[in-house]
Every structure is written in C-alpha cells, then in structure tokens.
Amino acid sequence: MSSTERQTDRQAEYACPACKHAVATVLARHKTLGIFVPVWGPGPCRNPDCSRCATADEPEPAERAGR
C-alpha cells in the first residue's frame, strides 16, 4: 500500500462477551481539539439466544451513528 492509499477494510471484528458471536461495528464521533474524529466500537448483540441480546426498542447501530 502506498502512502496515499487508505485502508478501508476491517482489521478485526468485535465479539459479544457473553455468547462470542460477531457483532456489528458502530461508528460514533468524538470532538477533539475542535474537530470530530471517528471512533469505532462494538454494537449491540442481535443473537436472540444471548443473555445480552438487544431488545426491539433499541435503535439499530446505523441509527445511533449520527449522534
């Protein structure tokens, strides 16, 4: 990869700590020194058999990313 190219693929996936299934990556913004920088983190677990499963009234990760 040259110095002008950017890496766009994920290096790792997040896993639910309870059921170990892969969860979506959520993008949020954090203000640092007057500008917003992206912050990636794990999204909610959507496995219905998991004890930490997200309920239906919680927003999808794409809806929360705009906050």
Image (cartoon, helix red, strand yellow):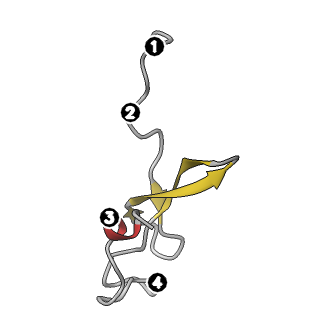
Q: CA distance from mark 1 to mark 3?
A: 28 Å
- N-terminal of the pair, mark 4 or mark 1, is 1
Q: Position of residue 53 (x, y in %)?
A: 39, 83
> Does residue 7 lie above or below 55 as drawn?
above
> Does residue 66 lie above or below 58 as drawn?
above
Q: Position of residue 33 (x, y in %)?
A: 70, 46
Packing grade of label 1 (10 A; few <14, some 14-19, many >=20) is: few
Is 65 or 47 nearer to us in this picture?
A: 65
**Mark number, residue 8:** 2
Residue at 33% across / 75% down in the picture? Answer: 46
CB under 8 Å between discs 1 and 3: no
Q: Amino acid at mark 2?
A: Thr
**Mark number, residue 52:** 4
Q: Amino acid at mark 3?
A: Ala
Q: CA distance from mark 2 to mark 3?
A: 18 Å
Q: Position of residue 8 (x, y in %)?
A: 38, 33
**Mark number, residue 62:** 3
Q: Position of residue 2 (x, y in %)?
A: 46, 9
Q: Nearer the viewer, mark 4 or mark 3?
A: 3
Q: Nearer the viewer, mark 1 or mark 2?
A: 1
**Helix, strand or loop under label 3:** helix
Q: Nearer the viewer, mark 4 or mark 2?
A: 2
- N-terminal of the pair, mark 2 or mark 3, is 2
